[in-house]
Structures are given as structure tokens and as C-alpha cells.
Amino acid sequence: MVLDDDDTALMQRVARGDKGAFSHLFDRHQASVVRFCYRFVGDAAVAEELAQDVFVKLYRSAGAYRPSARFKTFLFRVATNHCLNELRRPARRGERVETPMDDEGLPTALDTAAGEATPQHALEAKEAERAVSRALEAMSTRERAAFTMCRFEGLAYKDIAFALDASEAAVKSLIHRATLHVVRQLDALKAAATPFPGVAHG
Amino acid sequence: MADKDYPAELTAYIDGELEPADARAVEAALAQDPALRALEARLRSVITAVEALPHPTPSADLRRNVLASIEVPPWQARLRAWLSGPALVPAGLAVAAAVTAVVVWPQSEEPEGEQLLLAQNLEVVENLDVLGLDSPEDLDVVTSLHELEVQR
């Protein structure tokens, strides 16, 4: 039986060539890796390609895994390095694709469960998605990686520091700056949505 | 403590990532500074909104593709990527140049001629960018090319 906290044991089995163990790890973490890659590149199809590469690299580099590191941290180190390398390629060179939006202003790739949201919540979600998308484009690649791991994957700063090969102090600064990017984008969107801000109460 | 940059500490404070003493210092600053409290409230509401955003779900193809990919030997996977990527054009040019050299100077069968051609090609191979390779690791692909010949 496979327990929830035995990623490390599974990874050690993968290092010995156990494809069943790899399959378990894949099923557990595929959503996280796709989500991370999507927020990193802003395109659902490219995110799937990257996620595929990440898992194949994970399988092939299983021998390099040391149980002293949390499995998820190791996984995100592989994912981060792969995404950063991809963005360094001449064809992509730091480019993040602008997230395609549908008529409602929501990203076309996302399952938004719109029926459950009130109009006010839906509006706020739209604004937040636009702001995050624009802010991610404006961030440096390291800010983007740190922000994505923190906000969408819930990784602790020390784990993000391991994934980025950076100090915790540097991660703290990256995440703060990245969060401020989102605040500024939200403020800008709100300002743009208010035609006559000085006469709001007319 | 007076010159501490509290706004820069706020995100880590909200994330619960500060040491207890630093967190207490931020709390004391918040108690005294309405502008800092307003920024904290703003950051909290943005973080909550961001963490509630929807995400794409993986397709069924992803699982199939990944499990199929790990069945392929690493050198073969790199060869496929290499041949389907932008490396093809410079690599093709290098091969064409080598073939032209052999056709134009067919008499260069003496050891000196072969060695000269080999030296010229090695210069090209050492320049990974010319071949469109990303890293020296990809040279494994080149060194494994003869295995394809054997399979044929």
C-alpha cells in the first residue's frame, strides 16, 4: 500500500528502476508541476510539454536524489531549472506568453467553476487573474519562480531557497517584490476601470 | 531596530516566515503605524485572492506521453530532440561541408588528409553553438550515432 508521506521511499524505488513507483509519484504530483509550469510560461499547452520533460528528467535523474531533501523540493528544483533553461533558449529568451483570455476575461485554459461564484466574486477573480498574469510577465524569472512556488504550491521559503539555489533572505526579497508587482497591477486595473476617479461620488 | 524596513518584512510576516523576535518587532510597528497596517491589509487581501485562482488541469495525454517517454533510452530521446530541433540546419550544413570536402578532394586518402579533415570537423564539434547543441551532454547523441548504423 502506498502512504501519503512516502514520496521519498517511492523515489528510492524509482532510482532502482521501479516504473510502478514512478507512476505513483507522477499521479500525485502532475497537477502541481503543470500548475507551476503554467504560471511560469502562461500557456497551458507549453506547460504540459514542460511538465512532461520535467517528469522524464525526474525519472532519469532519480539516482541523484538524496533523501535528505524533501521529495517535493527536489521535484521543484528539477522543474525550476527546466523552466529557466527553456526561457533561456534563443527561441523563447525570457518570454512569457500572455495568457489568452475568453470573452469573460478569464484565462481560456482554466476550469473556473463559474457557476459557484457570485457576480462580485467572479469579478474579483477576473481582476486577480488579469493582475497576476500581467505581474508574472513583469517579474524577473527568479521572482516568478519564487512567487509561483510560494503562492500556488505553498512551499516554505527554505524549500524555495533550495529549489532556486538561493539564500532564504534572497527568497524573502523575491517573494515580497513579486507580491508588490501583483498589488501594483491590481491597482492599475482598478484605476483603469474607474473612468472618473475624482468624481466617484458625483 | 528603528531603521528596519518594515514594509519589506510584511510579506514574510504574513506568510509566517519570520523568526519570532522579528515577527514581534513587525507587530509592534504595525500597532504604531496606520500606513503599515493599511499595506498589511492590502497584501493580505491580494495574497488571498491570488491563492484562490483556478488552475489548468493536466490532460490525459500527459500521463500517456510521460510513461511512453521513460521507455525510450536517454541517448535516443536526446537524438530525437536534437534532430527535430533548430540544430538540424547547422548540423546539416556541417555534414554537407564534410561531404563536399570528400567529393572535391577524393584523393585525400593519405593519412595526412584524413587527419586534416578530422581536425577541421573536431573544431566544428567543439563549438556547440554551431551544431545547435545545448550542452556537452548532448555530444552523447553524436557519439551514439554509430549505434543507429548497427541497427540498420
Image (tube, rainbow, N blue to C red):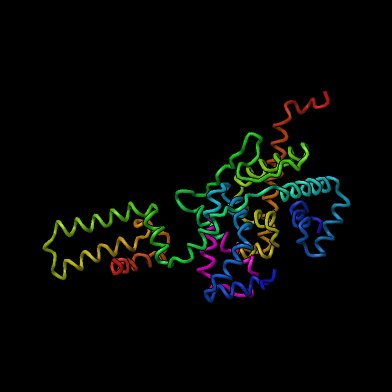
Of all residues, the one furthest to the right in this rendering is B31
Q: Residue B79 location, x and y as percent?
A: 38, 61
What residue is drawn where x is 73% and y is 41%? A115
Residue A71: say if magenta.
yes
State which quarter of the image contains the C terminus of chain B: bottom left
Q: Is residue A177 shown above or below B22? A: above
Q: Main secondary structure of the magenta part?
A: helix
Q: Is residue A193 shown above or below A24? A: above
Q: Residue B60 location, x and y as percent?
A: 56, 54
Q: Is residue B68 left or right of residue A187?
A: left
Quarter location, residue B77: bottom left
Quarter location, residue A68: bottom right
Q: Residue B40 location, x and y as percent?
A: 80, 49
What residue is drawn where x is 53% and y is 68%? A59
Of all residues, the one furthest to the left in this rendering is B107
Residue B123: say if magenta.
no
State which quarter of the image contains the N terminus of chain B: bottom right
Q: Is residue A135 left or right of residue B62?
A: right
Q: Which residues are magenta?
A: A50-79
